[in-house]
């Protein structure tokens, strides 16, 4: 059975003012077939976690590791991670001028499988998946994401998820900006992938509504670059009703305690760890 | 330095005169030496080509430098005298480099297209022109109802100013492709003049990949009713290269149709492309249908793409007229997106550039040439700065 492990992950991002620490020790273990939802306030680092897993070059792992089936991917290239079975459905999918959806999908499939897909079944698979996601045939000949509406971009992400058949998918706010019908269609796509390939899912969201379609096994609360609480689906309901206030307050109090302990340490001549210092 | 793109409409860079009033003469003495501020020179690095614009040019015929890949039925080639009546039948110079070439050439290369059945492409190659500043003149004549694909290939060293005349007879349907794959230090200033006959079609394709300064300016006159042109262009400018094209479509006759589409990629410090698209729809050109478009793909920092469409419409009675221009970047986020789908960095760049430019290459209609150019474009990608 496949397992994706995030171990004590610390990540900083390059900014104009220098490196900024965002993830402060994330631990998560996702098994094949499991769905983990991550909920947390804006700016808490959810997308950073998603990008770090996928290997975005702007995000630097300062300590900790990302391990897939015992293989350490922390230093692997972006494309190597994808070929190992990690998929990221992006919060803001990028437009690729000059590359049609058809061409892109075939190239990606060939790269992931190591050989070109058999033409006849492939064309049929693409057509079926597009129909399932209610994407008009015309999208196949359009440039990737170019001029797509927000919702169309999200469908295109799930189309790739269905066709590339990864082991694990990180869905970064795939539900945001979708109308009720689209939400249902996209959720069905994710559920098909779960059913067909026993996909493990890390689903980042702000809303409980998608969790009514894609049932999570675990819900994690994410605040200030850390998982601060984990539970079952009932936790999502509680978060939606009560918000993150209590968690944010607790996290701030903890950070303050650390800071003052550090100040005391510094006065006593102890060097603070850079991760906390940043 | 970042990448720059400039798109001006006719309203912001209004030429002093409309295109129809631009001065034309075959005599170099009739033109002042350009200062670099003129509307048709201001984007050209004239310092690098002053010899071609103002200097003496060697006008001897390039008999040993011009070669035909293989004879093709329906095509013939000959050197003709400057007094031959075909010379001057398609147009006259509108700038000093063009007039300088016209004033200096001894003999012209005449290429006739007479076949009425489609055949293989006729390939005329020029190379080994050396570094002496030269003048050349070519006259392409497509007989009424003829069919054919003519490919002009250029490689090696060169410093050349030239004129290419294209006369397309009634009902003819021909493709003229000019491919510039010069050495990095080469300079090439070309003016093409075309007259398209009644119900005839000229497909004109400019492919510029190699050369230091390459400027190919086609002026296509749709002078007979029902005349039609499709003008395509593809360029790949890398570090230090200047690739320019000023396209002029002159709708003179009624029911004439034009489509212009130029696409370019830029990569490397100092890569510079210029596309100016002038379309004039004269009062006499009722029923005109016209569209022009320029797309640039920027692959790195430090490049500059100038893209300037100008549309002048003198009659209200047209089918359609439009233009589009855009300059898009291939950036790190695109690379990340493609790589996150398992595609390697090298493959990702190839995918984007090939996809972007394939649309133009496919217009040539000669599979062997298309395949070779696809390879040449991909080779451009591996040129690192
Ligand atoms: N490339 C970057 N440059 C500068 N700051 C960044 C960058 N990426 C992320 N950050 C900062 O890191 C923090 C976490 O951002 P991230 O996008 O991970 O949050 P998020 O939890 O996904 O938020 P949201 O719910 O709004 O999507 C924010 O303060 C953000 O401004
Ligand atoms: Mg986010």
Image (cartoon, rainbow, N blue to C red):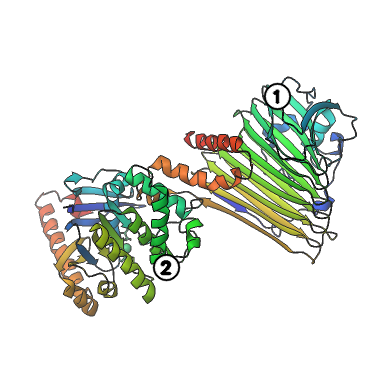
To the question of a shared chain for discs 2 and 1, the answer is no
**Front residue (pair B240, A151):** A151
| Residue B122 on image: x %, y % | 70, 33
Query: Taking A154 as reference, is A217 left or right?
Result: left
| Residue A210 on image: x %, y % | 29, 72
Task: Please tell me which residue is depicted at 71% across the width and 35% down the height of the picture.
Answer: B189
Tell which subunit mark 2 falls on.
A
Q: Which residue is mark 2?
A: A134
Query: Taking B147 as reference, is B337 left or right?
Result: left
Tell me the element at label 2. Answer: loop
**Front residue (pair B346, B305):** B346
Task: Please tell me which residue is depicted at 75% across the width and 39% down the height of the picture.
Answer: B191
Is any atom of residue A40 visible in this view? yes
| Residue B296 on image: x %, y % | 57, 49
Task: Please tell me which residue is depicted at 43% across the width and 51% down the height of the picture.
Answer: A104
Tell me the distance, in whole angstroms, between the alpha carbons under discs 2 and 1.
56 Å
Quadrant of picture, ligand 2: bottom left
Q: Nearer the viewer, mark 2 or mark 1?
A: 2
Q: Which disc, if any, is residue B123?
A: none
Tell which subunit mark 1 falls on.
B
Q: Which residue is mark 1?
A: B67
Tell me the element at label 1. Answer: strand
Are there few (<14), some (14-19), or many (20+) residues within 10 Å of tag 1?
A: some
């Amino acid at each position: 059975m496949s397992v994706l492990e995030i171990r004590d992950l610390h990540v900083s991002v390059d900014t104009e003012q220098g490196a900024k620490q965002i993830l402060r020790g994330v631990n998560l273990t996702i098994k094949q077939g499991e769905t983990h939802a991550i909920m947390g306030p804006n700016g808490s680092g959810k997308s950073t976690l998603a990008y770090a897993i996928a290997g975005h070059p702007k995000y630097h792992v300062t300590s900790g590791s990302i391990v897939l089936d015992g293989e350490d991917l922390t230093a692997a290239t972006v494309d190597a991670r994808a070929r190992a079975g990690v998929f990221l459905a992006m919060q803001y999918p990028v437009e690729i001028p000059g590359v049609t959806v058809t061409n892109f999908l075939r190239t990606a499939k060939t790269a992931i499988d190591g050989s070109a897909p058999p033409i006849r079944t492939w064309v049929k698979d693409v057509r079926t998946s597009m129909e399932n996601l209610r994407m008009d045939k015309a999208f196949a000949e359009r440039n990737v994401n170019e001029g797509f509406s927000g919702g169309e971009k999200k469908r295109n992400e799930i189309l790739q998820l269905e066709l590339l058949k990864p082991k694990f998918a990180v869905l970064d706010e795939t539900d945001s900006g979708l109308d009720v019908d689209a939400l249902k269609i996209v959720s069905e796509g994710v559920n098909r992938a779960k059913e067909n390939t026993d996909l493990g899912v890390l689903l980042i969201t702000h809303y409980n509504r998608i969790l009514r379609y894609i049932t999570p096994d675990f819900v994690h609360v994410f605040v200030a670059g850390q998982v601060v609480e984990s539970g079952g689906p009932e936790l999502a309901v509680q978060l939606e009703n009560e918000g993150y206030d209590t968690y944010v307050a607790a996290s701030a109090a903890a950070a303050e305690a650390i800071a003052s302990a550090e100040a005391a340490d510094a006065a006593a001549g102890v060097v603070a760890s850079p991760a906390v210092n940043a | 330095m970042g990448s720059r793109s400039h798109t001006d409409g006719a309203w912001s860079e209004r030429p002093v005169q409309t295109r129809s009033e631009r001065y034309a003469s075959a005599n170099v003495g009739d033109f002042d030496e350009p200062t670099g501020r003129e509307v048709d020179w201001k984007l050209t690095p004239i310092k690098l080509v002053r010899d071609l614009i103002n200097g003496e040019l060697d006008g001897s015929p390039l008999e040993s430098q011009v070669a035909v890949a293989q004879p093709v039925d329906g095509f013939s080639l000959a050197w003709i005298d400057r007094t031959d009546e075909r010379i001057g039948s398609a147009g006259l110079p509108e700038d000093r480099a063009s007039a300088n070439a016209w004033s200096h050439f001894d003999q012209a290369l005449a290429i006739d297209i007479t076949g009425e059945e489609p055949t293989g492409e006729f390939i005329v190659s020029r190379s080994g022109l050396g570094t002496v500043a030269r003048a050349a003149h070519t006259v392409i004549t497509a007989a009424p109802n003829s069919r054919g694909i003519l490919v002009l290939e250029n490689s090696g060293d060169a410093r050349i100013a030239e004129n290419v005349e294209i006369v397309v007879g009634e009902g003819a349907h021909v493709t003229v492709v000019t491919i510039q794959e010069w050495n990095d230090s080469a300079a090439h200033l070309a003016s093409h003049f075309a007259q398209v006959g009644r119900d005839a079609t000229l497909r004109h394709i400019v492919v510029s990949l190699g050369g230091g300064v390459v400027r190919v300016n086609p002026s296509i006159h749709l002078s007979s009713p029902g005349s039609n042109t499709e003008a395509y262009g593809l360029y790949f400018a890398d570090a230090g290269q200047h690739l320019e094209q000023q396209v002029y479509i002159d709708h003179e006759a009624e029911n004439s149709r034009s489509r212009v589409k130029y696409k370019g990629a830029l990569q490397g410090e100092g890569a510079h492309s210029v596309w100016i698209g002038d379309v004039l729809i004269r009062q006499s050109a009722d029923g005109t249908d016209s569209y022009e478009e320029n797309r640039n793909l920027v692959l790195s920092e430090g490049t500059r793409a100038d893209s300037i469409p100008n549309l002048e419409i003198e009659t209200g009675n047209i089918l359609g007229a439009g233009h589009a221009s855009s300059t898009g970047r291939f950036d790190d986020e695109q690379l990340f997106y493609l790589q996150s789908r398992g595609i390697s960095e090298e493959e990702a760049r190839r995918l984007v550039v090939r996809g972007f430019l394939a649309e133009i290459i496919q217009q040539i209609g000669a599979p062997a040439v298309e395949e070779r150019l696809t390879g040449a474009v991909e080779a451009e990608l591996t040129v690192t700065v």
